Image: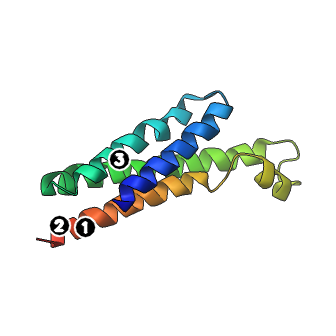
């Protein structure tokens, strides 16, 4: 349940932040699409062991990979701002939120842990 809630909240945050940027790049849609899928799978895995052992680890890995790619793009966006490395602290504060993709990755990690716990429980 925590995985589903975390996925929904981080997906909403990604939607709001990328909406403000008018979804300039197609990669900005990936957390918006993956988050509800991960949340639905996480909620369904409470009732179904099969979903918890097959779909939840796969979508959790996809969310983790998407978070890694997002972290790269956000870091690159910080460095591309005017001043680059000279004004790094300023660019981190006012550029793309560099740790926001890791919030989405945390939802994926919670899903991976939940799938492992679901396999052990009866």
Give the spatial CA distance, label 2 vs label 1.
Answer: 5 Å
Q: Nearer the viewer, residue 48 or 91?
A: 48
On the picture, is 111 further left or further right than 53? right
Secondary element type, mark 3: helix
Residue identified by numbered label 1: 116
Q: At 65% across and 27% down in the image, what residue appears?
A: 22
Q: Give residue 10's position: percent from left, percent from top.
A: 51, 50
Q: Separation of disc 1 and disc 3 at Cα?
A: 16 Å
Asked whether the beta carbons under mark 2 and mark 1 sit within 8 Å of each other, the answer is: yes
Q: Residue at x 17, y 67 (%)?
A: 119
Label 2 residue SS? helix
Q: Residue at x 22, y 54 (%)?
A: 45
3 or 2: tag closer to the N-terminus:
3
Q: Which mark is residue 38?
A: 3
Occupied quadrant, residue 107: bottom left
- The numbered disc on residue 119 is 2
Residue at position x 42%, y 44% from top?
35
> Would residue 50 appear left or right of 22 to someone viewing this image?
left
The colour scheme is: rainbow
Q: Nearer the viewer, residue 58 or 20?
A: 20
As drawn, is 3 to the left or to the right of 57?
right
Query: Can you name the residue that lies furthest to the left here?
Result: 122
Q: Position of residue 106 (x, y in %)?
A: 47, 60
Number of marks: 3
Task: Check disc 3: other Cα within 10 Å, few if <14, some if 14-19, many if 20+.
Answer: many
Estimate how packed mark 2 is, as few (under 14), some (14 to 19) or many (20 or more) residues with alpha carbons within 10 Å: few
């Amino acid at each position: 349940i925590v995985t589903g809630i975390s996925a929904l909240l981080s997906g909403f945050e990604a939607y709001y932040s990328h909406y403000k940027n008018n979804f300039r790049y197609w990669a900005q849609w990936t957390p918006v699409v993956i988050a509800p899928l991960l949340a639905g799978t996480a909620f369904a895995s409470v009732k179904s062991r099969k979903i918890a052992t097959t779909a939840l680890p796969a979508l959790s890995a996809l969310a983790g990979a998407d978070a890694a790619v997002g972290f790269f793009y956000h870091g690159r966006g910080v460095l591309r701002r005017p001043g680059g490395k000279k004004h790094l602290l300023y660019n981190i504060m006012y550029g793309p939120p560099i740790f926001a993709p890791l919030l989405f990755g945390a939802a994926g990690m919670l899903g991976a842990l939940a799938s492992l716990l679901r396999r052990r429980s009866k």
